[in-house]
Image: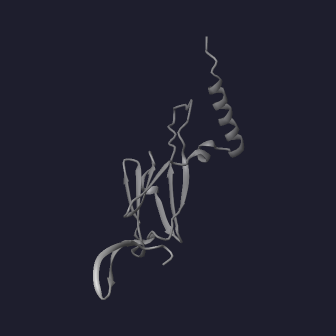
Amino acid sequence: MMRFDPFREIEELAQRMDRGFTGNSSVARFSPPVDIHEDEQGLELTLDLPGVSPDTLNIEAENSTLTVQAERKYSRVEGKTAHRVERAYGTFTRTFSIPTKYDLSKVEADFDHGTLTLKVPRSEAAQKRSITVRTGGQASQPKTVEADAQS
């Protein structure tokens, strides 16, 4: 006797509907998660790309936009019947709008054990720097001033 699981039924119905509209639910669902952190040096974007070969990665930086594109291929083995394929396969593209205070010409990318880490440094104009303020012709203590992106 098999137990009735309404949540499993709902999930299977959603998958069938996805296949009906897109023709291939795995391509529609392949959007890897990303973490974005910021510190004084710049931005760090971390994407989980398990099963993606570094050869399929394409990273482009242009006009305040950072785009990551890759492909995870499904390898069908002759003589084996797939009873369930839940992992997502296909090509994906993630695009990020990067503020102008970051320098897209100096992006660094590291790919290690299925994790892609992108580092986008702050532009020189947006770096903090110490400025000496003179009063009455005398130099006083330097003050740290953060440059504004519009200056």
Q: Is residue 53 left or right of residue 143?
A: right
Q: Is residue 133 left or right of residue 37?
A: left
Location of residue 89 by image quarter: top right
Q: Vertical placement of 71 versus 107: above or below?
A: above
Q: Residue furthest front?
A: 136
The colour scheme applied to this rendered structure is: one colour
Residue depicted at x 64% and y 18%:
4
Q: How many numbered circles does the render carry? A: 0
Q: Give the camera-side residue of 75 and 107.
A: 107
Residue depicted at x 66% and y 29%:
10
Q: Residue 14, image x and y in percent?
A: 67, 35
Q: Give the camera-side residue of 102 and 59.
A: 102
Q: Vertical placement of 71 versus 133: above or below?
A: above
Q: Residue furthest bottom?
A: 137
Location of residue 132 by image quarter: bottom left
Q: Residue 11, image x and y in percent?
A: 63, 31
Location of residue 81 by image quarter: top right
Q: Residue 88, image x and y in percent?
A: 54, 42
